Image: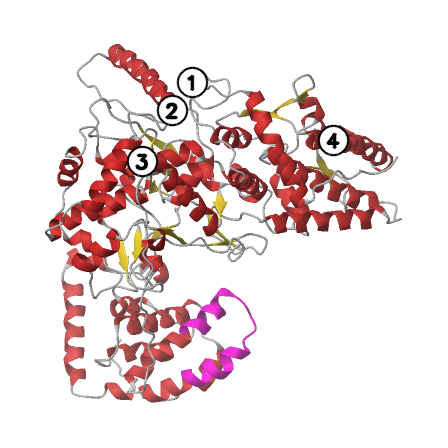
Amino acid sequence: MLSVPWISDLKDSNLGHLLAINSRLERVLATYPDLDKLTVSEKSNAKQLTRGMLTDFPIYTVLFFRSKSHHRLLEQMKQLIWLESPLATDNDISDYCRFIRVLSEKNIPQFIVERFPKHEPSASEIYEFLDYFSENEAQSVTDDSDYNNNLKENTKAAIRYLKVLTGRTVNRRTYRGKSKSSKKRQSLGIRGFTELDGHSVVKYLTIPDEDELFDTGFVRALESLELDQDELDDIGAQGVEPAEFEKRYRLAWYIDISSPLYAQNFRAKVKQKGQIAKIERHNQYLPSTVHLMNEVEATALFERLENYPVQSKNEAAVVLTLYIMLLTSSSFERAKSFSLLFTQDQGASRIADSIGYDLSLNVWLVPRLRLPFTTAEANLPDALIPQETIELPTYTDRVKELITQFFKSQKAPAKPLLKMRTKISQVTNFLKSISERLTPAKVSNYLILNLSSSTSISVAGYLFNRALPGSMARYYYSSHTEYEYQRIYDDLVKNTLPICNFHRSSGLYLGNPVSNFKYSFGARYVPSVDSIRKTLALMKASLHEERHKTKSLSFIDFHNCYTVYCIFAQSLLTGIRAVVDPFIGSRQVIEQTGLAIFRDKDTKDQFHTRVLPFHSLALKLSQEYERHSKIILEKMLLINPLFCRSKIFESDTTFFIEPETTQALTARPREIKRFLSPFSELPINSNRKFLRSYLEKQRLSPETVDATLGHASLGEPIGDSMSTFSFLDLREELFPALDSLIEEVELVLLKGIAE
């Protein structure tokens, strides 16, 4: 390449040295036969030969590139890489070599050939030409082929190298990574579950307490989130995450290499039955005395923390750790990693899995529980705005006193307890001095288990940023305002620690319930009452308009709108998933009992049947839609005699009609999303989120909420051997709440098409 210097900058004293090295290399290659395998044919594809080498070995790689039409011009460009420049970075050089590769892929464009500097140009002249080309000629190229697009982009990169080479100023971008909260939490003990990768999750199925004498261990499970692509498409259109589809039985493993295979199989079956029974008992009797402090022990603990004479920083660390564990339901590991902030704007988003404490407000800062999601969170206008942290009162002045006296730091946010060498054995010894029954796990589980048994596991999980054992699907559907969580926490502390002398002045006052009604802490894409009411109003107006149109096929548009209205309205009362047929027909209701039997969670590896008391308005919607559908079918027979032969009518109650082809369409998530989009941007699954959150806000029992949404875990469903709940209990508690919902969102029965 250097045998003839075609660049004026290369005519210096170093050229002779470079030519001497080049001649030696050529002689070695020609002399030693063992090096024949290094010979590359000129017919070889240079791009394939150098694949993966350009970034790491740009100067060597560029030797392979040859021009198909103008050899001298390309060699002049290549010789520029031999010019020395201490300011040129590796990226500058590799980007310039990539530009040469692009030029070599096809015949060099004519406008470059015609205007390229003649004879022996300098690096400065070549820079000026490429700069002119980039600003003028490249912009006039209208061909959008890959070659021309690459040429435009790589010309800009080549100019940067030539600027450095010729002593011109280069404006380089400096990037500083933004501080973000951890997306994948690695501690199973802190959050209750952990992601192994994007396709599987490990979580607890029972509450662990390694210090409990009568606890023989706990159960963990590995769950795969993998689904087929067509299933992912369906649930994606509906707004459902793969982690919601929990299998009835989880994967467990039992290692035994010394026994015969038949013995191993027998033991595995026995162990499986035992584990299942343990999970069922655990879920049905979650706040049992084995895992929970009693009120006397909790009061004694809090009084000891309030009055313990702290003499050293180590003692202060133990007392402060127990305060955090008790009042925020934190494990020992999370309590040690709590974040200390001095003002409201000192990076609450950096708390991640930890619990924060704001010294200026004397409040706990609880971050939002991060669930396994396959999609990034979008900002949808019809949904409540997600809130990343909430503030909870401490109800004691001593936390602030200990931090001010022993742990106040100049750095914020700080993690003062991480620097201490406090061990869990010190915490255990402190607890044993109060009662032999007390363990660190009992302290951290006290508030969260009490709340989960009285309100909801999902509410408790979000309030304390900790997932409890059981169905993870609950957490994808629960969301409330900060004011609501503060009210729940206030009631919880008063009921579980009633005789403790809490100082109201040291707690956070409960704010105005309407001051932050647009913000939500919990699940994604949860609509407000106003949003649901607005969507229903838009549908009513559209149906009124379509009803009075006189075009011959206008009934098709009316039918599609009426179908999506009935699906939308009934889902508010049933919480049905729109995975299969998203509508419960009157044939699925047992008239004598008023119970609806339906399936709404089918995938290729599971079958899910639900039984639910059917509200009278939901039944009226079914009956009216069925009457309407019969008239539509009669009209469609006149237009398309083959319409009724569609397999859709063999199983589904609802259907859409394609306006252009007059073909029947299944009411699957994709089509529901299409016909719902003029009225709301939220997926139909958001109605389930609204329903669960609404029932939780009405303070319905956890059994009622879970049974309505189909979120029961092993041992919890009505009729299970471990359950004491009945459908009569469910009906008596559920229907008054649904009546209130109907009134608030102004849900009414609309008539379908007339005869």
The residue singled out by tag 2 in the image is 285
Residue highlighted by disc 4: 620
Closest to the camera, between mark 2 and mark 4, is 2
**Residue labelled with disc 1:** 722
Circle 2: element type: loop
The magenta segment is 130-154
> Of residues 77 and 414, which is closer to you in this image?
414
Amino acid type of the residue tagged 1 in the rendering: Met
Let me know if residue 152 is in the magenta part: yes
**Pointer 3 residue:** 446
Picture coordinates of residue 343 (x, y %)? 32, 64
First in sequence: mark 4 vs mark 3: 3
Query: For this view, does 311 lie left or right of residue 45?
Result: left
At 27% from the left edge and 68% from the top edge, which residue is drawn? 58
Look at label 2 and name its amino acid.
Tyr
- Reading the chain from its start, which is encountered first: label 1 or label 2? 2
The disc, 1 or 3, on the residue closer to the chain's N-terminal end is 3
